[in-house]
Image (cartoon, rainbow, N blue to C red):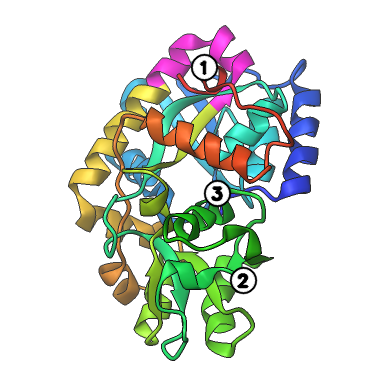
Amino acid sequence: MRRLVAGMAVLALAAAGAGCGSSGGGDAPTTADGVAQVKVGVIPIVDVAPIYLGQQKGFFKSRNIELTMESGQGGAAIVPGVVSGQFQFGFSNVTSLLIAQTKNVPIKVVANGVASTGEAGKDFGGVVVRKDSPITKAADLAGKKIAVNTLKNIGDTTVRESVRKAGGDPSAISFVEMPFPNMPAAVEGGQVEAAWVVEPSLSAVTAAGGRVVAWNYVDAAPDLTVAAYFASSKLIGENPDLVKRFTEAMNESLAYADAHPDEVRAVLGSYTKIDAKVREGLTLPKWPTAINKPSVETLAKLGATDGIFGGATPDLAKILP
């Protein structure tokens, strides 16, 4: 999940979003028939398959919501987009939302997004190395150059936890920012000694003979909540009925996706470029409707330990429903 938000960039964008809060975050246009025209800021990755599936199944239409999904580069773009009213709802990883909260960006989670499977060896994200690498376990990652999609976010803080739990020194890791699609080649070519990847890049690396040496989501917390859907405080306060209907439709979509993996693999072909063969083999995440609050608390603690909140402490009561 990219998700995500690059250290200084996110802070600047979050601050920009906060600056728009007084005038943005507005309501959705409504047709003469009473249908709310809702825009959702998403990242075109496996994680958001449920909202596309729910749209196909009519879970939103039955609640008088007409969805339009717009792709963002990650939380750095989507958070201010929600606050300004460009989007009524957005999708972002939890750490990005915690960073925004510490900057008093007026947003709040309204539905779960995606979760780790909680199973080492069967998760949708992990730290990979090339097949002939001397790195064989998480502790060996200490002191190595590791690619993550965004610095100072959920990738590096959970990778550090894998190394820490394995008895290694996480402070000695050198993280390199790199887009997920570029990581398989970077690992194979030796540009980095390891990379934190998610599907479908995870399948690409292992298909080429690469190995997973750490399951960082699994190591961070049991059944980790990785990302969530959120709205502006303004929209939540001024149109609670729309938010309630979106949350209900999203929960129905999450539950349906979790129970119908074949339909998830099919819908991925409608908004990603993942080919059919890869879609059949990749490991899907879990889509529970409940947010695992203890796991969010863990991410907040890990982020504080790693200094990504600039000394602030996230107020979970203000960001979680």
Residue at (36, 39) in percent of width and height:
55
Q: Residues within 10 Å of mark 2 (few under 14, many from 20)?
A: some
Query: Does the rendering let one see residue 70?
Result: yes
User: Which amino acid type corresponds to the residue marked 1 in the rendered image?
Assistant: Ala
In the figure, is residue 241 to the left or right of 22? left
Find the residue positioned furthest to the left.
Answer: 259
Which residue lies at the image location 59% right of the left edge and 81% below the top edge?
A: 186
Label 3 belongs to which residue?
154
> Does the CB distance between marks 3 and 1 fall below 8 Å?
no
Mark 2 or mark 3: whose residue is earlier in sequence: 2
> Could you tell me which secondary element the residue under label 3 belongs to?
helix
* Residue 34 against residue 8 in the figure, above or below: above
Q: Earlier in the sequence, mark 2 or mark 1?
A: 2
Residue behind mark 2: 143
Q: Where is residue 77 shown, x and y percent of the image? A: 68, 44
Q: Residue 15, position in %: x, y?
A: 79, 31
Span of residues in magenta: 231-245
Left or right of residue 99: residue 194: left
Q: Which mark is residue 317?
A: 1
